[in-house]
Amino acid sequence: MKLREFFTLERVSRILGAEKYDRFPSERIPPAFRIDSREVAPGDGFIAMRGENDDGHSYIKEAVKAGAACVILEKGYFEEQREEMLRLDASFIPVPEPMEAAVKLARAWLDEVSPRVIGITGSVGKTTTREFIYRALKDKFRTHSAIRSYNTLIGISLTILSMPPDAEILVLEYGTNHPGEIREMVRNFPISHALVTEISDAHLEGLGSIEGVLAAKIEISESERLEYMSYNSDNDLLSAAITRMPEGEKLKKNGIRQVGVGYSNSGIRISDVRQVVNDRFEPRLFVTLSAGEKKIQCQAPLFGKQHSRNIGFAYAASSEMGLEDEAFAEAAKGFRLPAGRGVIKTCGNECVLIDETYNANPTSMSHAIKNLLEMEIPGDFKRIAVIGGMRELGIESSRFHEVVLSRAALLDDVYLIGSEWNEVRKKPDAVRGVWESAEEFGSSFDLGECGRSAILLKGSRFYGMERLILAWQNDGAEGDG
């Protein structure tokens, strides 16, 4: 059987052990499966899933109208709506639990294609590192990766289900906010190469402590197919866990290669990091990577010195896959930051927007403020931060917010969004006020009065800080740096 024929609808129903219902029998092969009807393209499969705030079953008609070839849905819903469903031009596969069906299908496809699988986890840098690895490898190897931060069980399932049949390398991202989540993901989708970018204070409500974060991230080492593991060797807690805990001993006994990435002496050493931003606010990051006697000098159009470590991780993974140093250095010149992770945008009134709106935790917030303070800005530009609250920090939330504000004290102006900031009693003189939401702040803030300013925007996803970027771009942004 050719791989291209693997996902005939008949085969899908057999894998799931479920009956297939057709109005017009068809053997169309779904090139991908979607859970959002707005993303469905002709021939796709649609998986109707129930979420906390929405129910995919309500959008089945829209998915079919968009061209869905088949719909995987709850058996109970199908029985209730059988006549209406069978009038639609699609095949239907009713199952007890659509999410479990998606995972089962994804594992079957992963086993069939059998690529080498790189899995990335960590408190910060997952998506950026994934993007760098993909860009480094894609020209030499048939490489597949998610188009966005699909780092949950269902997200990884959808990434795998959209993987082409000739993929040689699959790059996945593993996120978590509670114990056992990554363990479940690597059990269903075992990886051959693991990367742990950082361990820091994030998702503490679900993970309890920094030790809980560590334990949750290290679950990635439990993959039954693991051959290689790289990690942040500058993080003492992480380094000790890799080398001393029982799982670390297991890694050694099984002959799994361990490679540290960091500024200290390690497998891959980072040095000579230099950030340059020219008078057009176009950034360039220079970094030297050393592996034994070998040195490679890289430059990339990136803003933020912390990305030197992400480049180091990308180099570690790419070298392990067999990419030559010269090819990696050339690929690095084309690295781009994912949206909301340090992209510089310029505005018509000589404002510079630093888009860090994707998410925030104490570590990433500190990096962003440090980058703004160290940015070499020509002329008399002001340095302004618009920062949203950091969520899921548990009982230590007020302390973390206080630390962040102390680091922002040297800025010219600081605007705070979110109730979390009200917990900080003593605020620096630079603070101009606290607003409950991005919308409330946006309605009272006039960007036109902030000429010649570099403005950092960052906050937890909850606050939707990217809406400010969008509104300000519509008011006259000229482009990206």
Image (spheres, rainbow, N blue to C red):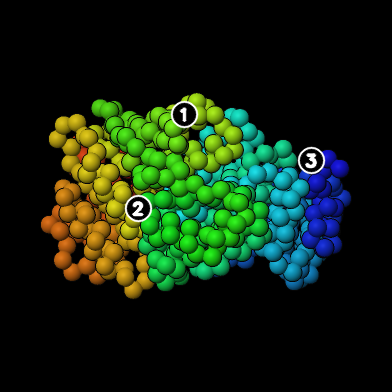
* Residue 364: image tag: 2
Q: Quadrant of residue 392?
A: bottom left
Q: Quarter holding the C terminus?
A: top left
Q: Nearer the viewer, mark 2 or mark 1?
A: 1
Q: Residue furthest bottom?
A: 395
Residue hosting label 1: 329
x 44%, y 64%: residue: 213
Name the secondary structure under disc 1: helix
The x, y position of residue 349, in whole percent, is 24, 35
| Front disc: 3 or 2 | 2
Res 4 label: 3
Give the quadrant of the N terminus: top right
Q: Position of residue 23 (x, y in %)?
A: 85, 54
Q: Residue at x 42, y 72 (%)?
A: 208
Q: In this view, does 183 lie to the left or right of 415?
A: right
**Left or right side of 85 for 347:** left
452 above or below 245? above
Name the kind of residue labelled 1 in the image.
Answer: Ala
* Residue 315 in the image, given as x and y percentages of width and height: 49, 38
Q: Which of marks 3 and 2 is nearer the N terminus?
A: 3
Q: Is residue 188 at all visible to an observer of this figure?
A: yes
Dot 3, how many residues are within 10 Å of its Cα: few (below 14), some (14-19), or many (20+)? few
Nearer the observer, 162 or 309: 309
Q: Is residue 444 left or right of residue 410?
A: right
Q: What element carries label 3?
A: helix
- Residue for point 26% across, 49% down: 369
Instruction: Tell me which label, 3 or 1, sits earlier in the chain.
Output: 3
**Circle 3 or circle 1, nearest the eye:** 1
Q: Distance between the residues labelled 3 and 2?
A: 42 Å
Residue visible at 42% across and 54% down?
198
How far is disc 2 from disc 1 in space, using C-alphas?
A: 26 Å
Visible residue check, residue 62: no
